[in-house]
Amino acid sequence: MAKHLPGGEMSSRILDFIWIADCSGSMQGEKIQTLNYAIRQTIPDMQKEADANPNARVMVRALKFSDGAQWHIPSATPVDQFSWVDLQAGGVTSMGMALDMVATELRSFPTDTKRLPPVLVLLTDGQPTDDFKKGLDDLMGTPWGKKAVRIAIAIGKDTDIAVLEQFTGNRELVLEAKNPQLLIQFIKWASTVVKTVSSPRAGDDDSSPSGVDLNTVPVLTDDDDGIW
Amino acid sequence: MMESGKRKNGKRRWISTGSRVQGASHIRNGQPCQDALSIKRDKDYHVISVSDGHGSSQCPYSDEGAKAAVEVAYFVFDSIFKGRGDPFQNFVANKDIWIPKQIEQNWKSMVTLIHGTRPVPFSYELYGATLLTLVVANDFIFALQLGDGDILSIEPISTDGNQEDESQKKTQVDWVIPPDIRIGSETESLCQTDAWQYMKARIIPLGPEDTAPMFLLSTDGYANSFNSNEGFKQAGADFYNLWEEEGLSFIDDNLEGWLMESSAQGSGDDIAVALVKEAVVGN
């Protein structure tokens, strides 16, 4: 074989994974503890998925919202170097501002085809206390926001499911974690969708929202005891 | 795969080659190569096609859909050459409606037949695939594209300097059909309703004195392996220079290895690439 490959520099495609976590006062106690535990536990699974697919570079970051929103882990971090920093709960639910901040970040991505659609996972137990619609409009106004794989995990029974459905654009991607076990399973599931979102899909394919295989979503069983 | 030819009796002759490789990620996951490549050569024209089967879980037979796509393209174009009238005029008259419709209808008929008695309920989506095809003839080039992938033209830039002394000739590389700006992994497909409406076609007439550019067709696994579009276009320029300086046999000897390495370093996807160039007397 010739020494040099034809063409310029090569690399795998970037896949951005963003946790968007509710840290409002109602998350205090077992909910925030379970969320912290579950995300930390799922990191090795994400790393395993990334190892199995070296042609996608998974970059992880996290954003938190309560009284306002801010980047919790601001730098896009290669998944093999990613570690979780525990969140603390307290305050209100500025979900709209959180989506606005994600939109600002996505707007800075180049709109070429060398990047895979980002995965956005929103975790919340409540209802937005700010202008959610403005935040969502901002997000959906960006090319990458529109194409993102958007998953919502509703924690407990007081979540506004209709709001989360607006975020995901599909009821099936709103996962209702009615107890700590399901929250752990959903977080684990959401962290591994990266392996399914990189396959090409036909332009009018609406059978599988965002290319996510919904058949693998964990379901509540009789063995799952306890509720929030 | 290669063929040499000479311009004889005023007729333009073509040389074409290509290769397809299973993607690095497909090898790891035990998936088949879902790209198809077809190079059909007649004495007066070549039909070169590549197709990318989508390969997602909704498209389990897309490797067969891709093979059907490149076969159908040849079938439709060959029928025009073998039909009545001047092929160039027929391509001009039919490029936007009749040809796209024929390709869609024939592909859908073919995958319906292929599906046969499979136990899975039939849908076109099971076989979803793109199609990029190029017809090179004596007096024209015809290009058609549906979905992701690239058709590049590569030609030397005329200069008044000592270009022959340069180790790398300067080239102009352009898309024959400008690509859509697409985000992520969504693509147009033959499995869509009214897929013909999404096909883009272009004709480039060639005068008797014109020297045709070289063309490169590739599925998107190739361009997606590069950091940038410029890096991909550089591949077109490099192929042109390699062909000029090292000859076609050098490309034939190395093409498969280059594509495998590109997939491993880049997209991980299957890759199909075809090259076609006008033969020069003495080739």
Image (cartoon, rainbow, N blue to C red):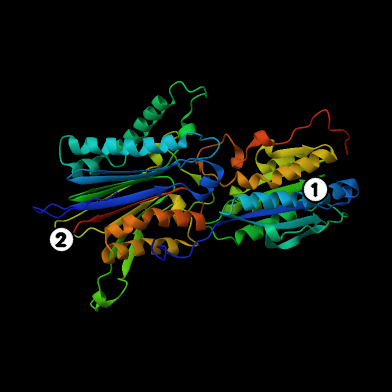
The residue furthest bottom is: B161
Left or right: residue A112 compared with residue B235 = right
Q: Answer with the quarter of the image where residue A216 lies.
A: top right
Q: Mark 1 lies on which chain?
A: A
Q: Please state, as top left, top right, bottom left or bottom right, where the C terminus of chain B lies in the image.
A: bottom left
Is residue A133 visible from the viewing direction of this image?
Answer: no
Q: Where is residue A175 in the image (x, y as percent from the top left)?
A: 74, 38
Q: Name the residue under label 1.
A: A38
In this view, the residue in front, A227 or B254, is B254
Q: Which chain carries label 2?
A: B
| Vertical comparison of B202 with A212: above or below | below
Query: How would you rate the neighbour count of disc 1 (Cα within 10 Å): few for under 14, some for 14-19, many for 20 or more?
Result: some
Q: What residue type is labelled 2?
A: Gly
Residue shown at 70%/36% (left/top)?
A217
Q: Which amino acid does label 1 sit on?
A: Ala
Q: What element carries label 2?
A: loop
Q: Position of residue B170 (x, y in %)?
A: 31, 70
